[in-house]
Amino acid sequence: MTRPDSRNVSGPRAPFRLQGRVLGLGLGLLSLVAPFTASGVRAQSEAAAPPSAAGTAFDVAAVRQLLVRGDAAAAAGNLVEARRLYDDARVASKQLSGFYRTIAGAFRGLDARIPREMDDKGRQSIELLAESNMRLAALLRRQGQPEVAVPLLVEVLTATTPASAQGRKAYQQLVEIGFVTTPYAAGATAGN
C-alpha cells in the first residue's frame, strides 16, 4: 500500500491545500514587507497622509514645520498633539528619504546633477528623521515610556553614526535609560 504524498495537490482536498499554500505565501510576503515599528509608534501604513494633503508642500521644509509645531505643542503642555506631530515628521522624513533614494538611483549614470541633489536632500531627510526620533524619544521618556523610546534611539544611531552629535546624544540617552551601560567618549581611545 502506498501512502499518498501529503504535498500532492490533487484529490478532493486539493482546493483547500492550494488555498492554504496561497494564504501562507501571502502572509509570508506580508511579513517581509511590513515595516518594523516600536510599540506605541505609528506604522507607515497607519500614517496620516503626507503634509501635502494639508495644503503644504511635501518636502524637507514641511517636515521642519511639523517639528516646529510639535515643539510649540510640547511647550504648551499638549503632549498628545506634540507626539502626533513628531510622529508625522518621523514618517514624512522616512518617506522623503526613500523617495529621494529611489530618484537618485533612477538617474545614476544618466545625469550626475540629479543624483547629487537627491543625495543631498536624502541626507537632510535622514537628519530630520534623527531629530524627529530624538524629540519623540524625549517626549516618551517624559511620559514615563522609556522602553518605547529605545527603538527610536537605536534608529538614530543607525541612521547617523555614534560619532555624530545626534548619535552621541542618542547613545547617551540609551545609557541614561539603562539599555546600555558602557559610556561612549567620542575621540577617546577604546579601553579594554
Image (cartoon, grey):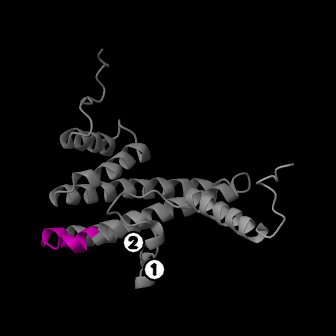
Q: Please tell me whether residue 80 belongs to the stretch shown in magenta.
A: yes
Instruction: Using a 10 Å C-alpha cutoff, classify the residue at mark 2 as few (fewer than 14 neighbours), some (14 to 19) or many (20 or more).
Output: some
Query: Where in the figure is residue 112, as x and y percent of width and height?
Result: 66, 53
Residue assigned mark 2: 62
Residue 100 in view in this figure = no
Left or right: 171 in relation to 9: left
Q: Please tell me whether residue 137 belongs to the stretch shown in magenta.
A: no
Residue assigned mark 1: 52
Above or below 47: residue 54: below
Query: Where in the figure is residue 52, as x and y percent of width and height?
Result: 45, 79
What residue is at 48 percent from the left and 70 percent from the top? 45
The residues tagged by marks 2 and 1 sit, at their Cα atoms, a distance apart of: 8 Å
Considering the whole magenta stretch, tell me its main secondary structure. helix
Q: Quadrant of the C terminus?
A: top left
Asked whether 22 or 178 is in front, the reply is 22
The quarter of the picture where residue 103 lies is: bottom right
Query: Where in the figure is residue 74, as x and y percent of width and height?
Result: 17, 68
Residue type for callout 2: Ala
Q: Which residues are magenta?
A: 73-83
Q: Secondary structure at mark 1?
A: helix
Asked whether 161 or 35 is in front, the reply is 35
Asked whether 166 or 35 is in front, the reply is 35
